[in-house]
Amino acid sequence: NYFEINKRNKHMVSSLLACLAVTLGTFCQAADPDPLQDICVADYNSSITVNGFSCKRNFTFTPEDFASMGIAQPGEPNIFGTRVAVANVFNMPGLNTLGMSWSRVDFDPDGLNPPHTHPRATEIIFVLEGQLRAEFITTDNVFVNKLITKGEVFVFPRGLIHFSFNVGRGNATIIVAFNSQNPGVQVIALSMFASRPQIPDEVVARAFQTSVEEVRAIRARLVPTNVTMEHNQAIM
């Protein structure tokens, strides 16, 4: 009868939707796509543009392509009281297509790894030395923060605004891992106040409910310093 046919049709639709969800789930990656070959050592000299780097020809790579001293020492100091060093596909070509990268952040006393996001990666940190506050904000504006100490790990979910602050008496160091060879980074303050070209003063002032004069004063403190867009890309 009509009710039995309608019930069967609903069951078929539900089954199709479930299959579609499973099928799409296999294509919706949480991080970089899986590699299709053993290795794809980045060829920095290639003129081919792809989503990542093209591969060196077979047998033209060396063992050095799979090693890096990128995080053996602290990076260059910045105005936030931190130094960031990285080991990623840009200085370790063997990482190409492997979906991971590392960084090291050294904190001066009161040093801040400022609020930022990684649009393409989840971040997990390991406290090598010191005592820090690890903090992130959900899309519901819930503020999650925890005191983390030597030997502890903490995770920042993908894409969420997060930051860490040295609250100990001495220096602090964290080792950071990402599930992307190029996680990307947007430092909130630099994105809003030091973009190129600049966001109109009136827009920034309205967004932060402040005056155009204060926006210009903040720009003056950020832009002429050693805070460059290249530095922005290095902060993890």
Image (tube, rainbow, N blue to C red):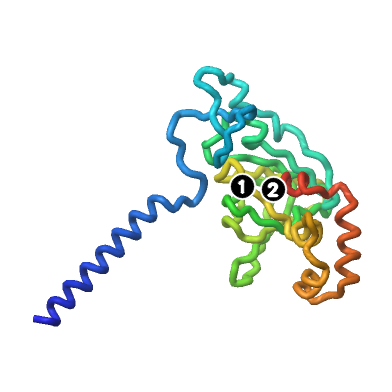
Q: How many marks?
A: 2
| Closer to the camera in the image, 74 or 183 | 183
230 sits left or right of 25 in the view: right
**Badges 1 and 2: C-beta atoms under 8 Å apart?**
yes
Please identify the residue farthest to the left as the structure is shown.
1
25 to 34, vertically: above or below = below
Residue 34: x %, y % from top left: 45, 40
Q: Residues within 10 Å of mark 2 (few under 14, many from 20)?
A: many
Q: Position of residue 191 (x, y in %)?
A: 75, 58
Q: Quadrant of residue 221?
A: bottom right
* In-image side of 202 versus 18 (left or right): right
Residue 146 in sight here: no
- Mark 1, residue position: 183
Left or right of residue 44, residue 1 in this image: left
Residue 150 or residue 86, whichever sits in front: 86
Secondary structure category for the residue under label 1: loop
Q: Amino acid at mark 1?
A: Pro
Residue 141 position, x and y percent, is 63, 71
* Mark 1 / mark 2, whichever is N-terminal: 1
Comparing 165 with 225, the one in front is 225
Residue sitting at x 85%, y 51%: 79
What SS does tag 2 mark? loop
- Horizontal side of residue 170 vs 157, given as left or right: right
- Dot in front, 1 or 2: 1
Residue at the disc numbered 2: 236
Name the amino acid, label 2.
Met
Query: Distance of mark 1 from mark 2, alpha carbons?
Result: 9 Å
Does residue 30 lie above or below 90 as drawn?
A: below
Q: Residue at x 32, y 59 (%)?
A: 20
Res. 105 in view: yes
Residue 150: image location, x then y, percent: 68, 47
